[in-house]
Amino acid sequence: MTCIATDGKTMAADGRMCTGDLIVNDETVKIFHARDGSVVGTSGDAAMGELVREWFQKGENPNKIPSLTMPKEDDSPVSALILRPDGRVEWMNHHFACVPFARVAAIGSGSEVAIGLMMTGMSPREAVEAVARQVTSVGGRIMELKPRARRKANK
């Protein structure tokens, strides 16, 4: 499972990967920089998450959306939380549809708790750490990233 949280300035995510009740890894990287400097966090099916990562790192071309194999009944589809360099927050579903989201936002296990904690003044990292102390499927290394300013092309 996953907990990814943002306050519109930074994004944090846990590193735990589970399959059922089994902890597979505590060092999974779930947030990354997109080509435009945005921070993107993926939750759900790991293989589908990798396709999402590649798409964002290649520039989010709407004409080249990857063909995703829909998950089986017991799999979880992928979703993403996106923190743009200008502070806008978006949520993306497994159809690659992005919609505006609240600036203080979270996805995954314990997301409601993480949002509440950030509303009381905790940082995204602190909120994810607090969720990890209560939700066994959330844990491991906590990673935090800030958006990057968009680089200007060389002329």
Image: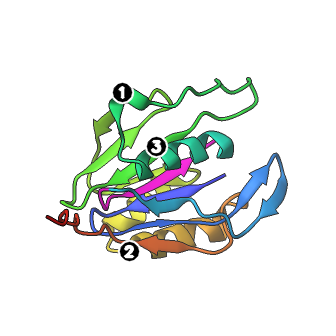
Front-lying residue, 94 or 57: 57
Reading the image, the residue beneath label 2 is: 122
Q: Is residue 2 magenta?
A: no
Q: Amino acid at mark 1?
A: Asn
Q: Secondary structure at mark 2?
A: loop
Q: Position of residue 34 (x, y in %)?
A: 39, 56
Q: Is residue 146 above or below residue 74?
A: below
Q: Amino acid at mark 3?
A: Trp
Q: Position of residue 147 (x, y in %)?
A: 31, 67
Residue 118 occupies quadrant: bottom left
Q: Is residue 122 left or right of residue 46?
A: left
Q: Position of residue 155 (x, y in %)?
A: 13, 64
Q: Residue at x 23, y 61 (%)?
A: 85
Q: Amino acid at mark 2?
A: Met
Q: Residue at x 30, y 35 (%)?
A: 99
Mark toward the start of the polypeptide (1 vs 3): 3
Reading the image, the residue beneath label 1 is: 63
- For residue 98, the mark is none
Q: Which residues are magenta?
A: 36-45
Residue 133 occupies quadrant: bottom right
